[in-house]
Image: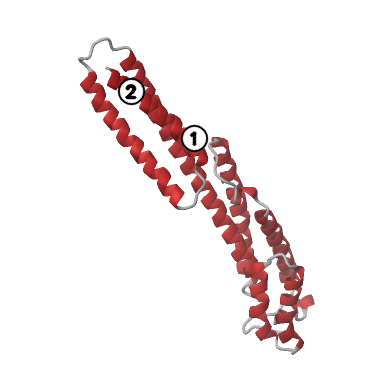
Amino acid sequence: MGYLFLSLNQPLKSIPYIRSGLEIEPLSSLGQALMRQAQSGLIPVGKKSKFIAPEKDDDFEQLYEDTANALMRLLKELLAEPFCTAPPTLEPEILVKIKSKHDEYLARQTKLAKDIQVLDQEIDISDLEIHVATIQRKLKQLENSYSLQALFLEINSQIQNEMEAVNHLIEKVEGILSLNKTLSEDNEIQILMDRCDFIADRLDDLGSKNIEITILEQSYMKYVSRLELLQDLLEEN
């Protein structure tokens, strides 16, 4: 439809259709070419078109070209960035890597945003803004990946801490020769059971959001098995 309006010499009507196509396929060379062609037929009010007498606006032309190229490089890298969609792990170093990647991309995006702001004072930048929107979505994906990775590590740390407490109590109960401390142990195990239920609720919450939690469930089940052993020991006493 955008191409049809261009052929009818109606570039203004073609832009929304071309923009929609670029939102679906931001790296489409045809879509980018059509957008440039459509914009070349427009002279925005209060702005100079980069397609009109470019020899009089060399600085802005060069800035536009440099910015557009840098924007496309950043977009390609983000579209190929595995951490944007990678499932969370229990490896702390992955969290560091995601943060490093995000900070690097964000610094580049911030620099480009300043250049685009300068360009916006003189020329139409709607074609660049389409790519900026996609970059922002990918950065948000990376932020979400970081947050989920941090959450998995935090929950797993909680599970490991609780398991240590259970193991300590198991050793304590196994060393008891008399029954006069059984009530004290019963109180402690109730606290542990409550914490176990709390962790289970956190896992259920993640599962309800269709988040793959198998690696956390594996840690949790080891914890539960130790807790059950503790209960058996107390019942024997």
In this view, the residue in front, 159 or 56, is 159
Please, is residue 39 above or below residue 140 in the view? below
**Residue 70 coordinates in the image, percent (x, y):** 70, 59
Q: Is there a contact, CB below 8 Å, between mark 2 and mark 1?
A: no
> Is the C terminus in the top left, top right, bottom left or bottom right quadrant?
top left
**Residue 102 coordinates in the image, percent (x, y):** 58, 49
Q: Is residue 161 visible?
A: no
Q: Amino acid at mark 2?
A: Asp
The residue wearing badge 1 is 218
Q: Residue at x 41, y 34 (%)?
A: 158
**Tag on residue 140?**
none
Q: Amino acid at mark 1?
A: Gln
Q: Is residue 29 left or right of residue 222?
A: right
- Quadrant hosting residue 172: top left
Q: Dot 2 lies on which element?
A: helix
Q: Residue furthest top?
A: 177
Q: Dot 1 lies on which element?
A: helix
Q: Residue furthest front?
A: 236
**Residue 209 coordinates in the image, percent (x, y):** 46, 53
Earlier in the chain: of badge 2 and badge 1, it is 1
* Alpha carbon distance from label 2 to label 1: 21 Å
- Quadrant hosting residue 235: top left
In this view, the residue in front, 184 or 55, is 184
**Tag on residue 232?**
2
